[in-house]
Image (spheres, rainbow, N blue to C red):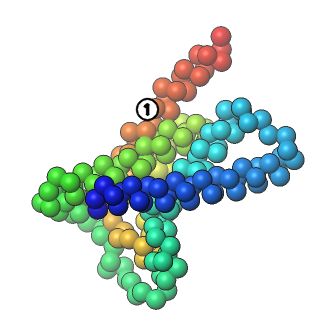
Amino acid sequence: MGLQGILLYTGRAMAFALCIGILWFFKELVVNTGKLNFLNRRFCLELVFVCYIAALVQIIVIRDFTSFFSFWERAHSLSSIQFIPLKTTLAEVKNGLWPFLYHVVGNMIWFVPFGALAPALLPYLRKFFVFLVFAVCCSLCLEILQWTFVTGISDVDDILLNALGAAAGWPFWRTAYSKIVKTDSK
């Protein structure tokens, strides 16, 4: 996929995320009977996380809406899943620099925000190993949905690279958290 395709997918994901974010915002407004504190750090983090997850689902699972709604028309089997670790990644090396970077960096970069946001919102994810297992499980769920709706190729490399991306985002949370704790204690 070229730069134009990447921008199209990103724009579509952002539009979808914005719609979901607006719906979530109004849901919170109704549930909290209009008593939302828009400057509350947790509320802002939750809104960003909801939008981020919506964008992730749009990029990985929904993709273009035509294939999402026609999944029952196309047959697929377990043989369509790539179970061999690093097979796709090594094949992309042979295809050239751009396909390799698109595959590796693309799969990692989309999960960096997960590493920064999830532990900030879910305290039980503040231990790195627990967080990493959770990130792998979330990536696995997205790959299963992708296979179920036949919107892409489910691949174990995607799970590994997504986990690496989430792990790369985790230090951002640690750094921000330590600064917030220091600021709040003053």
User: 9 or 176: which is nearer to us?
Assistant: 9
The residue at which mark 1 appears reads as 171
Q: Residue furthest left?
A: 94
Q: Nearer the viewer, residue 139 or 23?
A: 23
Residue 104 visible from this viewpoint: yes
Residue 16 point in image, percent of width and height: 56, 59
Residue in view at x 49 percent, y 29 percent: 174
What residue is shown at x 73% (from left), y 36% (from top)?
38
Q: Give the quarter of the image for residue 91.
A: bottom left
Residue extending furthest toward the right:
33
183 versus 81 height, above or below: above
Q: Tell which residue pokes out farthest to the top in this image.
A: 186
51, 127: nearer the viewer: 51
Q: Amino acid at mark 1?
A: Pro
* Quadrant of the image occupied by residue 60: bottom left
| Secondary structure state at the residue bearing disc 1 | helix
Residue at 54% of width from left, 40% of height from top? 117
Residue 23 position, x and y percent, is 70, 56
User: Label 1 crowding class (10 Å Cα cut-off): few <14, some 14-19, many 20+?
Assistant: some
Residue 94 at what x, y percent from top left? Answer: 12, 60
Q: How many marks?
A: 1
Q: Is residue 67 above or below residue 46?
A: below
Drawn side of residue 43 relative to residue 73, left or right? right
Q: Residue lying farthest front? A: 4
Q: Nearest the camera: 168 or 151? A: 151
- Image coordinates for residue 171, horizontal then vertical, percent: 43, 32
- Residue 174 relative to residue 96: left or right: right
